[in-house]
Image (cartoon, rainbow, N blue to C red):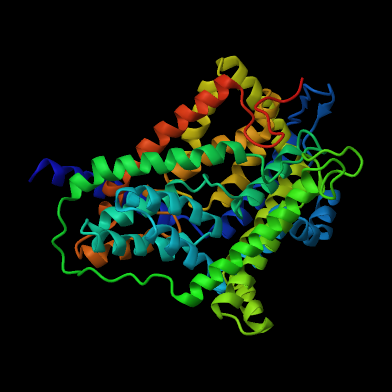
């Protein structure tokens, strides 16, 4: 047995353990229902032991609230609906996806991806594929179902190993999930969860969906560069020459109608951008705060989700008219409806997550845990860079057994955001550290939603491939992304750069 075979066997054994553990976990919605029930029980236990703490900011005594009391029972029954409908991430995700559904349904997103990849010089092919993968995660699953298999076809047509192209695209789409030049559905979703958690300490605190934009913008080029390096220097040499049965396919370029659609969409986007700039650039602009004339706390920043919906919708409709993929308003509505069809399980998940978050806030357990946790961290002497690196590693580890970014953050945010706020770190700073950890292990986590799909794509070119093949191919990306992102993160901390509009690293003193 060769050394490579031994390594693969070791990976397979390790993955078998992870897979068994993952399969033993119940559905995420069931987990949240269980967590909600656990919070109710813990609230009673905490109240029996009088686990009171002193708030370091106000000096007030914080006591646990017993949900098994008569008042607690009334709250559970009367606020169940409003817990659900008032849950911050729900509306933002639904509205954003309605607009993106139009762009996807008319074919705009697929056409843009093909245009970007096919128009690239061969020497930049790998970089463009990774870069396009990062950008595609704005539209959620489009990168997985369209770009990943397309990249394999493109590489094969270029005379290179198709699995190298597949790996490069997968690394961009999933490993670079938190990097982008544009705001996507994940930004308002995580911001909503962070806002809910921050309110445990400051009821008036709000995390803007664009709070991590500066860091994510720079990260896009970092991930694209690192992904290209790993593909060219590690993955391609390891894979060697392709000797499989698949033959190169011709990749259709955009036809005349699709090109016209892209032109129409481009004009629509330029008009929308002109409208936005016209409301932001001049003093007293119609998108600035009418009282303070600020941009940071303006209707534009508060309405980011609305602009995502409008921009994606208008561009999608313009493309559909030009490419003749829509004939009437019913076609537009079908695209929006199709995007909603995939959200059934998400809505079920949100219902139970909303109850859990509400119960957690009512009981004061999050605040008590945050104050005690902050005291423990202080006694350990951890702060700054070591503290945040440890948090990144915790998020990356949890991601191996729980795939949903929002589900994990719904659990982690109410604990870590208040804790780090009390240590002087902003929720935006904590959120960006979480996003790094959550992204880097996506490509090696069997719990990632599209992991099985990636295995199926790989088996088209290697009939004997399995989970171990995916892990051994993607592990170099995961390690490299983690190291590169942590270095960028450290540089950001040392320079004390803002991570987004109005989002500093430290709480105001």
Residue nearest the observer in this picture, 309 or 381? 309
Indicate left or right for 409 with 58 as reference.
left
Q: In the rendered image, is residue 507 in sight?
A: yes
Indicate left or right for 414 with 460 as reference.
right
Residue at the image position 63 percent from the left and 75 percent from the top: 337
Indicate left or right for 46 with 259 as reference.
right
Task: Report x, y in % for residue 280.
Answer: 78, 45
Residue at the image position 77 percent from the left and 21 percent from the top: 56
* Quarter of the picture holding the C terminus: top right
Residue nearest the observer in this picture, 290 or 360? 290
Q: Quadrant of residue 452?
A: bottom left
Q: Quadrant of residue 354?
A: bottom right
Residue lying at the far right of the rendered structure: 291
Residue at the image position 60 percent from the left and 81 percent from the top: 326
Task: Report x, y in % for residue 194.
Answer: 68, 42
Task: Report x, y in % for residue 87.
Answer: 73, 54
- In the image, residue 377 sits, relative to residue 16, either above or below, namely above
Indicate left or right for 263 with 372 as reference.
left
Query: Tag count in the figure?
Result: 0
- In the image, residue 268 sits, relative to residue 427, either above or below, namely below
Residue nearest the observer in this picture, 250 or 418? 250
């Amino acid at each position: 047995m060769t050394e490579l075979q031994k390594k693969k066997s070791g990976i397979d054994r390790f993955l078998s353990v992870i897979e068994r553990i993952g399969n033993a976990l119940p559905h995420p919605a069931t987990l949240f229902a269980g967590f909600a029930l656990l919070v109710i029980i813990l609230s009673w236990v905490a109240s029996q032991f009088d686990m009171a703490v002193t708030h370091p900011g106000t000096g007030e005594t914080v006591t646990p609230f017993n949900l098994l009391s008569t008042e607690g029972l009334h709250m559970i029954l009367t606020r169940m609906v409003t817990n659900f409908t008032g849950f911050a991430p729900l509306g933002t995700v639904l509205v954003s996806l309605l607009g993106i559904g139009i762009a996807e349904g008319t074919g705009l997103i697929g056409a843009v991806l093909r245009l970007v990849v096919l128009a690239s010089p061969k020497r930049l092919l790998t970089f463009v594929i990774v870069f396009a993968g990062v950008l595609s995660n704005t539209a959620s699953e489009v990168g997985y179902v369209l770009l990943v298999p397309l990249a394999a076809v493109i590489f094969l047509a270029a005379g290179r190993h198709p699995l190298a192209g597949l790996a490069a695209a997968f690394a961009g789409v999933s490993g670079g999930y938190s990097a982008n030049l544009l705001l996507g559905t994940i930004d308002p979703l995580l911001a909503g969860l962070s806002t809910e958690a921050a309110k445990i300490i400051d009821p008036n605190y709000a995390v803007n969906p664009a709070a991590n934009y500066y860091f994510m913008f720079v990260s896009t080029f970092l991930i694209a560069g690192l992904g290209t390096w790993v593909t060219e220097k590690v993955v391609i040499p390891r894979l060697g020459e392709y000797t499989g049965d698949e033959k190169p396919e011709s990749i259709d370029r955009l036809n005349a109608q699709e090109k016209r659609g892209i032109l129409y969409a481009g004009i629509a986007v330029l008009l929308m951008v002109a409208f936005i700039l016209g409301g932001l650039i001049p003093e007293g602009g119609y998108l600035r705060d009418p009282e303070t004339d600020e941009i940071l706390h303006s209707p534009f920043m508060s309405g980011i989700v609305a602009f995502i919906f409008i921009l994606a919708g208008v561009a999608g409709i313009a493309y559909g008219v030009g490419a003749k993929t829509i004939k009437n308003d019913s076609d537009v509505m079908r695209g929006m409806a199709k995007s909603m069809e995939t959200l059934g399980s998400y809505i079920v998940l949100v219902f139970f997550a909303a109850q859990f978050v509400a119960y957690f806030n009512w009981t004061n357990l999050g605040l008590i845990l945050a104050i005690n946790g902050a005291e423990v961290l202080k006694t350990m002497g951890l702060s700054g860079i070591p503290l945040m690196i440890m948090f990144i590693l915790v998020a990356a580890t949890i991601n191996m057994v729980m795939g949903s970014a929002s589900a994990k953050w719904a659990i982690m945010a109410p604990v870590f955001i208040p804790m780090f706020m009390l240590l002087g770190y902003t929720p935006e700073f904590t959120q960006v550290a979480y996003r790094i950890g959550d992204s880097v292990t996506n490509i090696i986590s069997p719990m990632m939603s599209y992991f099985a799909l990636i295995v199926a794509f790989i088996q088209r070119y290697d009939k004997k491939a399995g989970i171990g093949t995916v892990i051994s191919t993607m592990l170099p990306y995961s390690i490299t992304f983690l190291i590169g992102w942590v270095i960028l993160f450290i540089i950001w901390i040392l320079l004390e750069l803002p991570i987004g509009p109005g989002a500093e690293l430290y709480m105001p003193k």
